[in-house]
Amino acid sequence: MPQLEQQISGFDERMSATDFWDDAEKAQQVVGEANRVKRRLNPFLALEQRAEDLDTLIELAREADDAD
């Protein structure tokens, strides 16, 4: 996952360059590749978020149980 995040960061850096769209065909290829990498990364990020949400729910359940 860190490798995918690094790739996205690199794409973002390239796309923020002032001359990025000077070569429209190459720019479109970069944008397409960035989108492909993001599509690969998004399921992992969603899973990570769900795991964090579950940890929070478990903690809230423990606190509620302790209050009883």
Image (cartoon, rainbow, N blue to C red):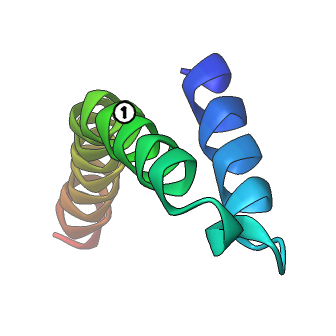
Left or right: 45 with respect to 64?
A: right
What is the three-letter code of the residue carrying label 1?
A: Leu
Q: Is residue 38 depicted above or below 64 in this figure?
A: above
Q: Dot 1 corresponds to which residue?
A: 41
Name the image quarter holding the C terminus. Answer: bottom left
Identify the residue at image location x=81%, y=73%.
Answer: 19
Identify the residue at image location x=51%, y=62%.
Answer: 24
State which quadrant residue 43 falls in.
top left
* Mark 1 nearby-residue class (10 Å; few <14, some 14–19, many ≥20): some
Provide residue 6's location: percent of width, then percent of height.
72, 33
State which quadrant residue 64 falls in.
bottom left
**Secondary-structure class at tag 1:** helix
Left or right: 24 with respect to 39?
A: right
Q: Is residue 32 depicted above or below 18 in this figure?
A: above
Provide residue 57's location: percent of width, then percent of height.
21, 57
Left or right: 62 with respect to 33?
A: left
Outermost residue toward the bottom in this view: 18
Identify the residue at image location x=46%, y=43%.
Answer: 34
Q: Foreground: 11 or 22? A: 22
Q: Foreground: 62 or 12? A: 12
Provide residue 10's location: percent of width, then percent of height.
75, 43
Left or right: 37 with respect to 23?
A: left
